[in-house]
Image: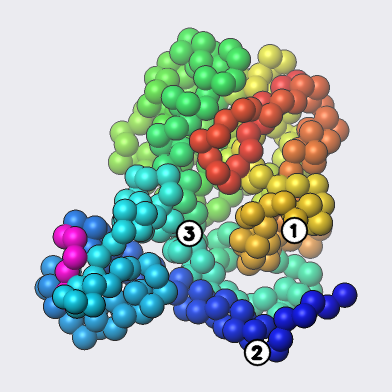
Amino acid sequence: MSNSISTRDFAAKVSQSVTGGLNCALTLLGDQLGLYKSLAASGAINSAQLADQAHLHERWVREWLYQQACIGQIEYLQATDEFYLSDAAKKVLAEPDHPAYLGGLFQSVVAIYDTVDQLPGCFRSGKGHSFDDKGENCACGIERMSRKFQADHLVPDLLPQLQGIIEKLQQGAVVADVGCGGATSTIAMAKAFPNSRFTGYDISLHALDRARNNVEAASISNLTISNAVDDPLPEDGSIDFVTTFDVIHDSTHPDQLISAIRQSLKQDGIWLCADVKGLPTFAENLQDNPMATLAYSFSVLVCMSAGLSTPDGAGLGTLGFHKDKAREMSRANGFTRFAEVPFEGDAFNAFYDIRP
C-alpha cells in the first residue's frame, strides 16, 4: 500500500541521502586535516584563522566551512563571520577517546566507495568480497570504531560480568581472540593479565599487519598474532577463554567457526561473543531497531558481502547473528549454556556468555 507523500517531497527525501553521501567524504576530510580538532581547541574562529592554524589554503577551508555549516555539523556566527563546534559536535567529531566519536565510521564508509562499481557483479553472481578486498582504509576505520570500547571498557567493565573469568586470567589462562582485527582488544587484555598467554587470530592480511604493528608498538610479550588460515585454533580443548568481537556475522562459515571454538575450549572454558544488536525478523528491525538503516546499508557493502565472499558462504549479514540465532547455533555446535551479558557500555553490540 502506497503512502500519500508527493513526488516532490520524495525527491527531497532522496536528495537528503545524496547530501549525506557527499558529507561522509567531506567529514572524513575534516578529520584527516585536523580541522575539527582545531575548531574544538580554538572556539569561534574565521576561515583565515582556521586555515592558518591548519597550514591550509584559505579558499578551500572557507568552502568546506560553508558546507559544514549548511549541513549543521559546524555552527556559524553571522555577526562576526566565525565558525565553532558545539559541545556535542566536539565529542562526535573531534574527540577520538569519547564513546560517541564517529571518525572511524566515516573512514570505513568512504573507503567502501571505491568498491561500489564491483557490486553489480556481486548481485549477478551471488559472490561477495572479503574485508581485504575493501582495502586497508576500511580495516583501519573499523578498528577506530571499536577502539574506545576495547581499549578502555573491555577489561574493567565487561570482563568482570563473566563469572570466574577474572580469576582465571589473573592466575594464568590460555586465551584466543578470534577475528582480532588490529588486536586492540587482545592488547588490552594482555596488558591487564601478564600471567596469561594470548593469541590473536585473523584471516585479513590488512588486519594482521595492523595487529603485528600494534603489538610491537605496545611492547607486549605475552601475545602472538596468527593467521588462522595457516595456524588455526587448536582442536585439543586447551583454551580457557575465547573472545569474538563482531566476527560471527561476517564469517563465511559461522557454523564451522563456532564448532572450532567449541573444540578449542576446555570443558570449563568460556566464550565471550560480541555481535551487533539485531532482532529476529526484518519486520521487527524495521519497526523497532533504530540502527536498522545503518546496519542494512553496511551489510550490503561490507558484512554480508564478506559472509558471501566464498561460493558457499552463509552471508548472515550485519543483523543476522541476533540473540536467537546465536543461542540456536551455539547449541547446535555443542555449547549448553548461553546467557546475555547485561552490559550497556556499547550501543551497537550485544554480549553473550557461552559455555560448554
Q: Which quarter of the rendering shows the N terminus?
A: bottom right
Q: What residue type is labelled 3?
A: Leu
Task: Provide the secondary structure element on which disc 1 rests.
Answer: helix
Determine if residue 226 is in view.
Answer: no
Q: Where is residue 265 in the image (x, y as percent from the top left)?
A: 68, 23
Is the Cβ of the residue at disc 2 closer than 8 Å to that at disc 3? no
Please tell me whether residue 344 is drawn above or below residue 168 in the rendered image: below
Mark 3, Cα crowd under 10 Å, few <14 / some 14-19 / many 20+, is many
**In the current view of this chain or complex, which residue is farthest to the front?**
79
Point out the tag, 2 or 3, that comes first from the N-terminus.
2
Q: Which quarter of the rendering shows the C terminus?
A: top right
Residue wearing tag 1: 286
Task: Provide the secondary structure element on which disc 2 rests.
Answer: helix
- Give the mark toward the camera: 1 or 3: 1
- Image label count: 3
Q: Does the magenta stretch include residue 122?
A: no
Give 161 or 266, whichever is nearer the viewer.
161
Q: Marks 1 and 3, how far apart in space? A: 22 Å
Residue wearing tag 2: 8
Q: Marks 2 and 1, how far apart in space? A: 24 Å
- Give the mark toward the camera: 2 or 3: 2
Q: Does the magenta stretch include residue 45?
A: yes
Instruction: Quadrant for residue 44, please give it.
Output: bottom left
Give 312 or 356, whichever is nearer the viewer.
356
Residue wearing tag 3: 105
Q: Is residue 231 left or right of residue 190?
A: right
Q: Which residue is drawn at 29% across and 76% down?
A: 65
Task: Report the magenta residues as a range.
Answer: 42-47
Q: Residue at x 32, y 68 (%)?
A: 74
Mark 2, Cα crowd under 10 Å, few <14 / some 14-19 / many 20+, is few
Magenta region, main secondary structure: loop
- Give the mark toward the camera: 2 or 1: 2
